[in-house]
Image (cartoon, rainbow, N blue to C red):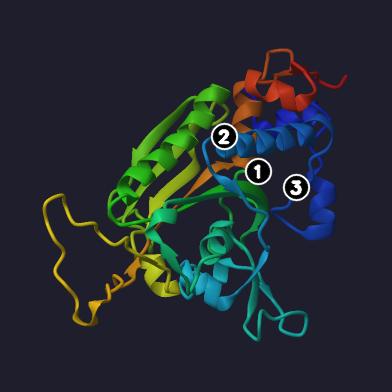
Amino acid sequence: PLWHDDVATNLGGWNADAAVGMSGARFVSLTGSVARLERAISSYFLDRLVDRGYTEVSPPLVVSRSALEGTSQLPKFEEDLFKIVPESHTCNGEDAFLIPTAEVPLTNMHADQILEEADLPLSYCALTPCFRAEAGSYGRDTRGLIRTHQFYKVEMVKITTPETSDDEHHKLTRHAEECLEELEIPYRKMRLCSGDVGFSAQHCYDLEAWLPSTKEYREISSCSNTGDFQARRMALRYRPEVKQAAEGETAAPKKGGKKKKPKPVLCHTINGSGLAVGRTLVAVLENYQTPEGDVVVPDVLRPYMGGVERLKKKQ
């Protein structure tokens, strides 16, 4: 099987040289049917998640230092971020950065807020470009779309109570799996050991798609339950509902005759890719290529491609 960039080249949709000429290494330009296929994947993911109860968001792509500290990308991973020079822009007087993932603006929408338990869980999704400097990855995955400075990703974020976070984490992971299953892309689900779990997470599943060209599975989604780690950093809390006295019981009277509101409790936050669009495009191009050099369009994507069933190799 051919590599995805060779498949895309045969379709007339790969123009890496132009992108590198204007932007430098690890940038790619897609054209024609390949660009349309990427857009179809994005639209399918968003529609799929909205059908599952997520609220679609179009968030800012520039965020402050404190927002990145809230979701724990800072201070540990500053060298992986694209920082905007202060002379160009600051965020309310703070350093400004391009987002590395929509997890940052989606979770920070409720920073410094006290939510009501009755409103939880909150489920959000967003399609955004993501920007990563990829410091320390010199020489790794230099070919194709696997590791680029700019890529599209559909992100899922849930804000929950501590009691429901584990169940919601499994639901979120399952929603990502369903996308792969409907695309009929072979994949495996990996539960990470504590040594491999990210800085902020307490439980994480990686979903890895099969790539025939290199005969290996590559990560296409990472679904993490961060517990109250992020919520504590960004002061994201909720107020528990007042418990009603059981039938036949009488609540103890309060001084002054007023019911005291429960104290706010830290929320739990969950995030995951649903899915990484570029790597999904890689998986589709490689798993659906034909011996003739064409690419069969997966059934679930055909409505987003105007009914096109096959992308033809350019002669």
What residue would you read off at disc 3?
28
Which element is circle 2 on? helix
Say what amino acid the circle numbered 3 marks: Val
Q: Is residue 264 left or right of residue 287?
A: left
Q: Residues within 10 Å of mark 2 (few under 14, many from 20)?
A: few
Residue drawn at x 79%, y 53% is: 20
Could you say which is closer to the camera, residue 314 or residue 234?
234
The reply to whether residue 48 is visible in this rendering is yes
Residue drawn at x 46%, y 29% is: 187
What residue would you read off at disc 2?
51
Residue 145's mark? 1
Structural distance between the alpha carbons of marks 3 and 2:
31 Å
Is 41 rendered above or below residue 25? above
Could you say which is closer to the camera, residue 252 or residue 198?
252
Is 61 rendered above or below residue 83? above
Which element is circle 1 on? loop
Confirm or deny contact between disc 1 and disc 2 (CB under 8 A): no
- Upstream in sequence: badge 3 or badge 1: 3
